Image (cartoon, rainbow, N blue to C red):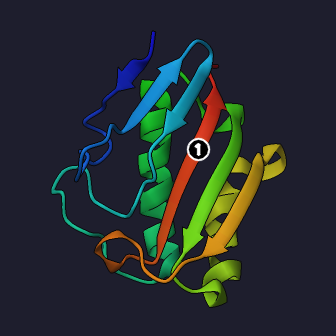
Amino acid sequence: MKEILHTDAAPAAIGPYSQGTALGQLVFTSGQIPLDPKTGELVTGDIGVQTRRVMENLVAVLKAGGAAPASVLKTTCFLADMGDFAAFNAVYAEYFGENAPARSCVAVKTLPKNVLVEVEAIAARA
């Protein structure tokens, strides 16, 4: 049976979706954007600042599902501008290092609330 994940350490959903779900040994996160979980406000700043907030939100949802960055199998990353790719990668790599998951990274026309980055993940429970 599908389990709905929720944690106060990540932003509440801003639409009809869950922060994440789990089924068996798999955890699926919704796309995380740079919202401060305490205030619900956007974290402003460059791609590095926004990526760090996104990754912290992602880790919080993973943890709520019994997973961790080391158990992430695949991420999908959305950038508003592929010109930010190198700076995005620099922060992203801090969370995965040598244990990087499979990944797709695409540039899109617009992201929710006009943010610069969104990341979702599929992980195995640790």
The residue indicated by pointer 1 is: 121
Task: Using the image, determine if residue 48 lies above or below residue 32.
Answer: below
Q: Is residue 94 left or right of residue 58?
A: right
Which residue is drawn at the image coordinates 36% and 23% (left, top)? 4
On the image, the x and y values in percent for residue 52 come to: 49, 63
On the image, the x and y values in percent for residue 98 come to: 84, 48
Q: Is residue 126 left or right of residue 51?
A: right
Disc tally is: 1
Task: Using the image, determine if residue 13 lies above or below residue 118.
Answer: above
Which residue is drawn at the image coordinates 37% and 26% (left, top)? 5
Task: Using the image, determine if residue 75 lies above or below residue 80.
Answer: above
- Image quadrant containing the C terminus: top right
Q: Is residue 95 visible?
A: no
Which residue is drawn at the image coordinates 64% and 61% (left, top)? 92
On the image, the x and y values in percent for residue 71 come to: 69, 31
Q: Nearer the viewer, residue 32 or 50?
A: 32
Which residue is drawn at the image coordinates 72% and 60% (left, top)? 104
Q: Amino acid at mark 1?
A: Ala
Element under disc 1: strand
Q: Residue furthest right?
A: 98
